[in-house]
Amino acid sequence: MHFEEKGDAIMILAGSKSISDFAERQTRVDTAKSQVTISAQTVKSIKQDLEKQKVEVERVIADQQIQRKAIEDKKIEQQTLIIKYRDNAAAFALEAATSREEKIKLINQEYQNHLLSLRNRGGFGTVADGYNSYEAFIGNYGFACPRDNIRGILDTYYTCQCTSYAAYKAIEYWGPRVRVTGWGNAYSWASAARALGYRVDRIPSANSIGQTASGAWGHVFWVESVNTNGTINVSEYNNAYSSRSGQWGDFGYRVGVNPSEYYFIHFD
């Protein structure tokens, strides 16, 4: 609907029957104009609101897309970390296993070199058949080893080692009151025993532990008996020169050993 101010008034006047009729018609026209103006303003306002809503919806959609992208990126990052950790864990486990094997080989080589030097100096004694009194199991290296748990006392040493066997024998004979766990390598046993109040001297006695700090790791053994000539008979582990198999990690027995090379740890 379109209205021209002057032309509309003339047309209304020309078509009116009277002044009152003109006034009534003019009022209707003014009312119609006002309604059209209000409707146009309303449409404009609604349009502006819709445009604002559209902008807000587009912003929300954009935010959601950014969030989805961030979530996807996080998932990819986590998956990458999982794969990396898994690969690193496998590599670390392999490296640790290899390192442990190399360490064991090094310990054994140093230890056997020490035992060989003892044998060459004399006083090593004679290899003999001894009675292996402990209940054994087959360890990782295919040889019989002391049990890990002796009368409820946890064996904290490597199995198939001289320390494992000496600890086993001490607890087997003297009972669980004897505490010989956590003493470290064989070279530290004399000082560890003294620190706990055990008697340590150069005098051998049956059912004591013989110890030397010589070599890279030292050595310990179990004194089975003392002979009338002062030599001793010993049982031990991880001495390839006295073992039944001729290899390290096995039981061995020597007789006529010169005790002057050793300290002795007593538990009586």
Image (cartoon, helix red, strand yellow):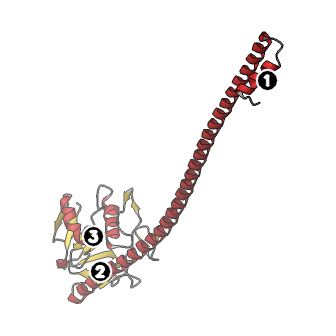
Q: Does residue 86 appear to the left or right of 228 in the view shown?
A: right
Q: Quadrant of residue 41?
A: top right
Q: Quadrant of residue 248?
A: bottom left
| Residue 104 in picture, x, y percent from top left | 36, 76
**Three-letter residue code for mark 2:** Tyr
Q: Which residue is mark 2?
A: 111
Camera-side residue: 51 or 112?
A: 51
| Residue 178 in picture, x, y percent from top left | 28, 58
Q: Element type at marker 3?
A: loop
Does residue 125 show up? no
Q: Element type at marker 1?
A: helix
Q: Earlier in the sequence, mark 2 or mark 3?
A: 2
- In the image, residue 20 above or below residue 37: above
| Residue depicted at x 33% and y 56% | 176
Q: Earlier in the sequence, mark 1 or mark 2?
A: 1
Q: Which residue is mark 3?
A: 185
**Three-letter residue code for mark 3:** Asn
Camera-side residue: 46 or 265?
A: 46
Q: Earlier in the sequence, mark 3 or mark 1?
A: 1
Mark 1 or 2: the one toward you? 1
Q: Which mark is residue 209?
A: none
Camera-side residue: 17 or 228?
A: 17
Mark 3 or 1: the one toward you? 1
Q: Which residue is mark 1?
A: 11
Q: Residues within 10 Å of mark 2 (few under 14, many from 20)?
A: many
| Residue 188 in picture, x, y percent from top left | 22, 68
- Using the numbered discs, state the Cα–Cα distance from disc 1 to disc 2 in whole angstroms: 128 Å
| Residue depicted at x 80% and y 12% | 21
**Three-letter residue code for mark 1:** Met
- In the image, residue 74 above or below residue 248: above
Q: Does residue 229 appear to the left or right of 60 in the view shown?
A: left
